[in-house]
Image: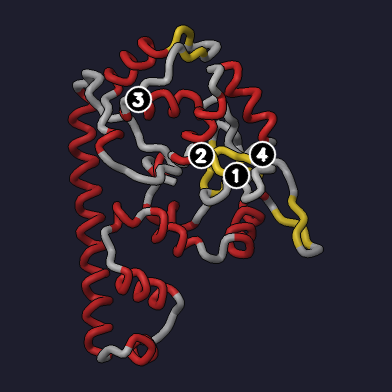
């Protein structure tokens, strides 16, 4: 999820879909489905604008959006399993008394945890404000030292992603014989190089478009002979997602 989140406010992420100026469309953060602004969408016998259709899509097709955010970002959120369960209970609109009974806790304990969550959210907003000021200062003296963004479907965020923009450019020119069209010389074992390679290859796939396995293979074959390895890493690292039977792939 995270790459397209970088420029979003918390309220926009919580909404579950975002506006793409480039595509002139609303796009679902969970599955990448595109709702073009000029289209009218039919659902349950009624017709909706693109934004309303995107909202209904998330509500009806991804009712577990908050659960997905919790499950796919465990390391970033640093929550215990009990805290995750409490957050879901709060999100479900349950009273403190009902939650206390469900979890076998005192109502005062539940109220305290709600207070802790609220204070943590306030601290997070303050950190975002401070970080924005830091970024403003760095943008004024751009030396290529900014870290590359982490893509939206990253399955594990660790030191592999500690790559500056300058480093990324050096790696790109060392491992690819051509950038346009994309042609990979070798697939090195070093994790940071893999990240740079997979980031570049992922750009060959369109957001919101569904591909068959054959189409994915054809795209990857043009880049590197060992397309099976590329496909496996794109799936494992969360750049692409697919159905359980492998009949459909899409960019995460």
- Decide: is 154 above or below 81: above
Distance, label 1 to label 2, CA atoms, is 8 Å
> Percent position (x, y) of residue 198?
44, 28
Task: Say few, some or many: other residues with alpha carbon within 10 Å of mark 1 (under 14 / 14 to 19 / 20 or more).
Answer: some
> Percent position (x, y) of residue 108?
23, 88
Camera-nearest label, 3 or 4? 3
Q: Which residue is mark 1?
A: 242
- Decide: is 27 above or below 216: below
Disc 3 element: loop
Q: Residue 92 has which mark?
A: none
Disc 4 element: strand
Label whose residue precedes the other's in the sequence (3 or 4): 3
User: What residue lies at 20% left-to-right and 39% top-to-bottom?
Assistant: 133
Please indicate, yes or no, whether residue 4 appears anywhere in the rendered image: no
Please indicate, yes or no, whether residue 155 appears anywhere in the rendered image: yes
Disc 2 element: helix
Q: Residue 210 has which mark?
A: 4
247 left or right, relative to 124: right
Q: Which residue is mark 2?
A: 235
Q: Residue 189 has which mark?
A: 3
User: What residue lies at 22% left-to-right and 23% top-to-bottom?
Assistant: 145
> Percent position (x, y) of residue 204?
56, 25
Task: Say few, some or many: other residues with alpha carbon within 10 Å of mark 2 (under 14 / 14 to 19 / 20 or more).
Answer: some
């Amino acid at each position: 999820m995270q790459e397209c989140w970088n420029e979003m406010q918390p309220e926009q992420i919580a909404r579950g879909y975002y506006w793409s100026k480039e595509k002139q469309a609303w796009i679902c953060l969970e599955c990448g489905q595109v709702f073009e602004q000029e289209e009218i969408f039919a659902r349950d016998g009624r017709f909706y604008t693109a934004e309303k259709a995107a909202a209904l899509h998330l509500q009806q097709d991804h009712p577990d959006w908050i659960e997905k955010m919790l499950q796919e970002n465990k390391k970033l959120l640093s929550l215990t399993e009990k805290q995750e369960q409490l957050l879901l209970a709060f999100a479900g609109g349950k009273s403190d008394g009902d939650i206390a009974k469900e979890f076998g806790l005192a109502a005062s304990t539940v109220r305290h945890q709600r207070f802790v969550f609220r204070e943590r959210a306030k601290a997070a907003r303050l950190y975002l404000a401070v970080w924005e000021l830091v970024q403003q200062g760095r943008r004024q003296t751009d030396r290529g030292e900014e870290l590359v963004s982490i893509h939206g479907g990253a399955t594990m965020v660790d030191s592999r992603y500690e790559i500056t923009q300058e480093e990324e450019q050096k790696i790109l020119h060392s491992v690819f014989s051509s950038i346009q069209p994309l042609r990979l010389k070798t697939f090195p074992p070093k994790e940071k190089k893999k990240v740079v390679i997979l980031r570049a290859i992922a750009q060959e796939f369109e957001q919101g478009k569904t591909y068959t396995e054959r189409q994915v293979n054809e795209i990857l074959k043009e880049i590197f002979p060992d397309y099976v390895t590329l496909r496996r890493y794109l799936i494992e690292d969360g750049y692409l997602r697919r159905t359980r039977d492998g009949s459909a792939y899409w960019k995460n």
